[in-house]
Image (spheres, rainbow, N blue to C red):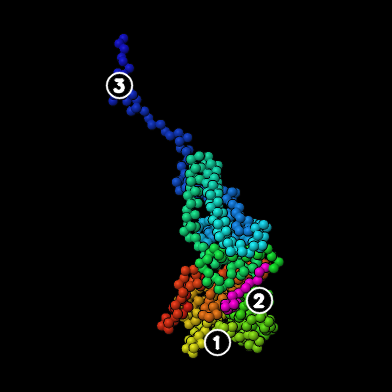
Amino acid sequence: MVRVPSAVRNLRHRLPGGPRARSRRHRRPVPPTTTTTALAPRPRPWKRALGLIAVVLLGAWLGLLVVGNVRVPVGPMDTTMTLRPSLTGGTKINVSPLGALDLDSHHAPVRLDVNVDQLDPARSQALVDHPERFSGLQDEVTQDIARGTADLAVRSVVAVVTGATALGLIVYRRPRRALAAGGLALTLLAASGGTAYATWNPDSVLEPKFSGLLSSAPSLVGNARSIVTEFDVYQKELARLVTNVTKLYDATSTLPAYQPDPTTIRVLHVSDIHLNPASWAIIASLVEQYRVDVIVDSGDTMDHGTAAENGFLDPVEDLGAPYVWVRGNHDSLVTQRYLEGLKNVHVLDDGRAETIAGLRFAGTGDPQFTPDRSRKPGAEQSQELAGARLASALRDQKAAGTPVDVAVAHEPSAAREVDGTVPLVLTGHIHRQKTEVMQYGTRLRTEGSTGGSGLRAIEGEHPDPIETSILYFDRDTRRLQAWDAIKLGGLGLTTAEVSRHLPEENQPGATPSPTPSPSAEGQHLFGLVAPGRP
């Protein structure tokens, strides 16, 4: 038998008519097996991306929570600095047991928490024994914070990368995916840091919001004059904050009293007391604490306006400052006549103007009397008419050479009619604090309820806060320089919060307002646009 070489046999099988080709033509397709049809579809890319982001965020947060803090000595104090996820950013300085300072320092998805742990006895005693060291405290504080921030940045990088990588390894069990999670966490932290750096506002220390002991807050943030004239000294303000905290710790039984600038006129604005007897004690305390020159009440002192309620008003005579009052929709003419008979009370109505404590006030009472909270037909039109009459009186005052500095009405709808005729108008009625600059330059400041909405406070699930404000005016120009918004916990609560606000022309770097001309009276009377932080 002749042996055929293997190469020839293979070639024969590959030819079109060969046996292998014929077998392929007659081979039937194999149906898919059950195992093939049972395979689940691969997850969509966007689902995988969302899962990875969730792992990164959770891992980074856990990392910061566990190891993302540093102990830093700042001046005479021992502090702990921490980065925390946040939707609004900012800096929070916790000064236990005094409270906390919230600063709008930056806008980024991370917040800087600074906890004042304790006062170092040796360093604080050295400052007490050598007061001259206070002059160099600002540089020391700045260096301490810079060093602490650098250490915190390094530790935060390690914390978020380690946390995200570890959680990624647990969830995915693949080193490559875990490393991707760590890298993404590092990228997010770098982006957050860049955003914080780009939006950093060192002047935020000038407008802190203080929570805790009400009596110490004014001492911590300074007075109106210093806030207006010292915008370019952030380090000095920061050192002052540290210095005052040191003093508070050193003498907790005798907290430093607020020392107002003698050239500043201080006005306490109250509204909507609604028969809350606790309001008188609060007002008297604020008058003494802030050395208030005049109290302005924008109405709704009563709840039903009956003669039986008139005895509630007797403490007004002993509050320690002149009391300017306009009628609200819960105050009757009976209430108004009773107040007119009390000493130290100045009732304003129908555009009547009076000069009190160096400021000229004019106001009008609410045209509506609705103690049952009803809404009568034509109520809005009557408010606008009352506001128009007040605006006409304000123009007459200016023409007579006695321009009004502050107008007072109860409802904001009436107050809007005086836009362009007065620098500032005060109102109430809506039971919440609000500030805006209207179209023609008049600032509208609406006060909350200084009575915590009175007996209505028990109607809702949460008690309404007690709100009032201290307004600071320059004695020479009689213009508003700053205001402190004060909020106290409602019925049964003991919280206190003070936040300082500045008109935009008093903000750092603002151009001084020019003297208004008669032709530009509406828009340039006060040189104002929307405030930086209403």
Sooner in the amino-acid sequence: mark 2 or mark 3: 3
Mark 1 crowdedness (10 Å alpha carbons): few <14, some 14-19, many ≥20: many
Residue ID for mark 2: 288
Where does residue 349 sit, x and y in percent of width and height? 56, 86
Q: Which residues are magenta?
A: 255-269
Label 2 vs label 1: CA separation?
26 Å
The disc, 3 or 1, on the residue closer to the chain's N-terminal end is 3
Q: Main secondary structure of the magenta part?
A: loop
Q: Residue at 62% of width from left, 82% of height from top? A: 323
Q: Residues within 10 Å of mark 2 (few under 14, many from 20)?
A: some
Residue at x 30% of width, y 21% of height: 11
Could you tell me the amino acid type at mark 1? Ala
Front-most of 223 and 516? 223
Real-space Cα separation, disc 2 to disc 3, in angstroms: 113 Å
Residue 204 visible in the snapshot: no
Residue 224 point in image, percent of width and height: 56, 73
Where 119 falls versus 165 (above or below)? below
Q: Which mark is residue 353?
A: 1
459 vs 62: above or below:
below
In the rendered structure, which amino acid carries the disc numbered 3?
A: Leu
Between marks 3 and 1 in the image, the one whose residue lies nearer the viewer: 1
Whether residue 261 appears in magenta in the rendering, the answer is: yes
Lower sequence index among marks 2 and 1: 2
- Estimate the x, y position of residue 20 in percent, counting from the top left: 33, 24
Q: Quadrant of the N terminus?
A: top left
Circle 1 SS class: strand
* Residue lying farthest to the bottom in this orientation: 400
| Alpha carbon separation for disc pair 3 and 1 | 118 Å
